[in-house]
Structures are given as structure tokens and as C-alpha cells.
Image: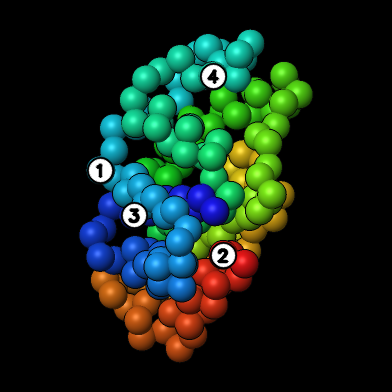
Amino acid sequence: MNIIAFNGSPRLDGNTEILMNEALKPIQGTGHDVEVYHLNTLNIKPCQDCGGCVKTGVCIHKDAMTEIFAAIRGADRIILASPIFFYGLSAQTKAMVDRCQSFWCEKYLLKKTIPSSPHGRKGLLLLVGGMKKEDGLRCAGITAKGFFRTVSVPEHETLAYGGVDGKGDVVKHSTALKDAYEAGKRLAE
């Protein structure tokens, strides 16, 4: 099984990465192919809304997304992990998601979907934010739902934690690490 994980946090070893790594623990060493993308370190140009993908479903811009597009096509499982910034996904995460407009064109205009392997396609969304209100988690979740649907991932689980702001504070959360570990196990089933 091919599993890809996107860490959308600019903060190294922060709450988002800790949570994502915990979800990956039960998957690593099981023989599955796992590839992690740290979006902040990649050269990803924001979507230009140029229409270059409308007739082909292929983005005309060549940068780190070229590799990510191929990884998404070959993935059986996708983990999307992001901190919440101003009620939404981080800019790094959102830039990657927006560039998936080419998949949207392919799916909805050209009526093609990414074929599923015998394992099917599933996703896991991990969200962490400092705000205690659930608005930011909900708004980011809606955007992520659109991403998963667009890249032909029909089902995904969401783990979202508010009130977690300081670097490393997610380890103090009463259930977050256990929840992520168990979600990772379910994802690999």
C-alpha cells in the first residue's frame, strides 16, 4: 500500500508534525511505502487560475507539485496535517490544495477520476490550532473535505484539536497522541 503524508506546518517539530508522526508510527515498519512531504520546504507556486489545466486536467506549471501530483495519483492513503491559521489551513497546505485544481478539472470537467487500487483510497485529516473555538477547525475541515473529494478519496477521518498553541503542547493533550496512533492503525487496515 502506498501512503503519503503532507505536513503543512512551517514549524519544525511542532504540534502538527508530532501528531502526524504519531499517526505514522503504527504504519512504519509494516511493509507499506510511506512518503512524507514537508510542504514548507518545497517550491510550490500558488495556483495562478490560468486555465491551463481546463482541457487536459494537467497543471502547466512545473515545480514540486509535479512530484506531488504523481504521488497523489499513486496513493492508497493520504494524510493531510495542518495547523489552523486564521480559521483555515496553513498557507503551505492551502497552496498545495489549490494546485489540485487540475484534479478538479480532470474529475468534474473531463469526467475522469483517479483509479482506485484494490486497497481503495482513504484519508486522514489532522488539525491543530491555538483557538479554543471550533470555528477554525470546522472551516479548515470543509476545505480539506473538498481536497479529499477532488483527489478521489471518498472517505476520510478527521482529528481536530483546538486550544493547542505552544510548540509541543499537543503531547500534553489528554487523548491526541493516542487518537492519532489509533487513527493511523485504522488508516493502514
Residue 145 visible from this viewpoint? no
Residue 93 or residue 117, whichever sits in front = 117
Cα distance between the residues tagged 2 and 4: 29 Å
What is the CA distance from the residue labelled 1 to the residue labelled 3?
A: 10 Å
Three-letter amino acid code at the position of disc 3: Ser
The kind of residue on which mark 1 rests is Thr
Q: CA distance from mark 4 to mark 1?
A: 23 Å
Whether residues under marks 3 and 4 lie with C-beta atoms below 8 angstroms apart, the answer is no
> At which x and y percent is residue 73?
55, 36
Determine contact: label 2, label 4, CB under 8 Å. Answer: no
Residue 128 numbered mark, or none: none
| Disc number lying in front (2 or 1) | 2
1 or 3: tag closer to the N-terminus = 3
What element does badge 1 sit on? helix
First along the sequence among labels 4 and 1:
1
Please state, as top left, top right, bottom left or bottom right, where the C terminus lies in the image: bottom right
Residue position for label 3: 9
The residue carrying mark 2 is 188
